[in-house]
Image: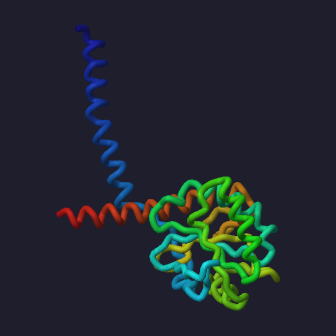
Amino acid sequence: MNTKEKIKKFTVLGVLFLLPITAYLFFASGVNNFVKLPVLTENISEIKQFKTEDGKTKQLKDHITVLCFFGSDIESSYANAFNLAHEIYKKNYQFKDFQFVILTPEGVEKEVQILKSKLAEIENPENWNFVYGQPKEIEKVFNSLGTNYKLDKNNASPFVFIIDKDQNLRGRNDDEDFGVLYGFDARVYSEINNKMSDDIRVLLAEYRLALKKYNSKREI
């Protein structure tokens, strides 16, 4: 074996030896320095005063929630719902404790059923939770988010919000376009597909990591 062949052999062996160590150090560093999705507002109002069509209640506590306000003109929110269904719901609805909650004024149950039938063509709508209540209650929950957005005359907003298991609003405090980004404009496909999808991924990873650490401690 000549000198060049020896150098090549030891180079390959060195790479094979160092690659696993480098990968380990990279992922270990990622775990220790994991960037969490910022908390923007704490203690969002609970939603137990709202009821589903069959009289059941839902809650924010202990759930990862995408909170929506489609208002009384349900048809005007179709495009927003489809963007969310394709880019957020379809990818994540099977994650434990993940849910969509749509606060809706009473009296639009038939319109909601039509929308749900259309959503079923995209993915099983089992975790699309439309809950009904009075406009004042919808406004109360919306105001508790502490954002700079407003509901329109139909109690609707194109913005959707990520609420964690402790009823905190999660978002961005250093967004390159908006600075503080409280919610995501469901009318803008790119914003849902890029920013919101990324932030949901970060939050779910945060909970997966917390669960992994919890299980590791139990095994010790």
Q: Is residue 3 above or below residue 189?
A: above
Observer able to see residue 190: yes
Question: Residue lying farthest bottom?
Answer: 136
Q: Is residue 76 above or below residue 82?
A: below
User: Of residues 143 and 69, which is closer to you in this image?
Assistant: 69
Q: Which of the image's four quarters has the N terminus?
A: top left
**Residue for point 67% across, 82% down:** 132
In x, y percent, where is residue 152? 79, 80
Image coords of residue 192 (percent x, y): 66, 59
When asked about the image quadrant of residue 30, the answer is bottom left
Rendered residue at 56%/57% (across/down): 198
User: Along the horizontal axis of the image, is 3 left or right of 152?
Assistant: left
Residue 144 coordinates in the image, percent (x, y): 61, 86
Q: Residue at x 36, y 58 (%)?
A: 31
Q: Nearer the viewer, residue 149 or 88?
A: 88
Tell me which residue sits at (54%, 62%) in the image: 200
